[in-house]
Image: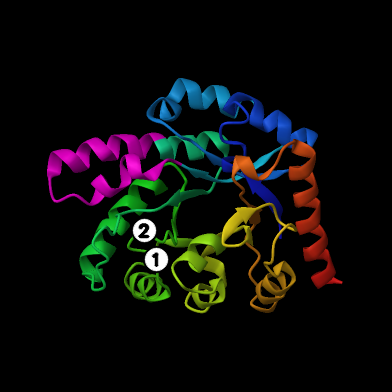
Amino acid sequence: MKIGISTSTFFNTVAAENMFDLMRKMRIDTTEFCLNTFSDYEKDYVDKLAALRGGVGVAAVSPLATQFEPQLFSPNVRVRADAELIFRKVCYACFAFGAKFYTFRGPINLNDVKEFDYGKLAQRFAQLADIAATYGVNLSLKNMRWSYASTPEFFKKLFDKCPRIFATFGVFHAEKAGYDIREFLDVCPPERISLIEVQDFVKNEWCLPGKGKYRFDRLFSDLDRRQITAPVLFAAQSDSYTDFVQVRDAFEFLVGEYKSVKQ
């Protein structure tokens, strides 16, 4: 199992062009690379970033999904077509970075809908998975609390109908939706989990791992027992640290928690 960091941790503190160099200096070799705006998806810029990767492995690429992913499910053909143009650019970014997974969020659930047409959704997810596959990429649906995929039930029912989809499970969004992440792990075969994203908490706010109350030893034990080998990456908000030594210490803390379970 790889332990690493999401580049969302560096948002507004480090230019994207400098993130790979910073991770190498921290001796962090696994990341999810986040692209944050439309110009980030352009091929010339993606190729420039990919050339800087060095020895850092990119497990997944994550776009700012609310810019276009909900429109991929629009009933309007022109809207879907425009969104697919951006979707393909992100798929290319995955290919350029050597990432096997695209961290995908999909539709926003503004009205807190509880019942879904899983057959229709599965058909559309399969179409998108087919597009991603032409770039050598897999779609990995993340459990965002504001999306359709906010509950274990959604994952179970969608996966039953669309075996092409993988899962990215995040501690923060599981907790915010009222679930323990283990409830998501219960409904997903280990081989279909592509990434686990972790955060720590103080008074329901994010903080660096090791600075809050979250039981990472318990999480690693659960992952080990379930034979889940997906990378575990941490994400933190930029106001949760004052220097990169603290970020490096958080990484070392997670590595130590994992090693204590494996001993």
Outermost right residue = 263
Q: Residue at x 75, y 37 (%)?
A: 244
Does residue 51 appear to the left or right of 105 in the view shown? Answer: right
Given residues 203 and 1, the one toward you in this image is 203
Q: In which quarter of the image is residue 121?
A: bottom left
Element carrying mark 2? loop
Give whichever of 173, 30 is nearer the camera.
Answer: 173
Numbered circle sitting on residue 150: 1
Q: In which quarter of the image is residue 79?
A: top left
Image height of 211 relative to 220, above or below: above
Name the residue beneath numbered marker 2: 146
- The answer to whether 231 appears left or right of 142 in the picture is right
Give the magenta range: 63-89
- Where's the C terminus, which quadrant? bottom right
The reply to whether the C-beta atoms of the residues labelled 1 and 2 are less than 8 Å apart is yes
Which residue appears at 29% of the width and 34% of the height?
85
User: Looking at the image, which residue is at 42% across and 30% down?
Assistant: 41
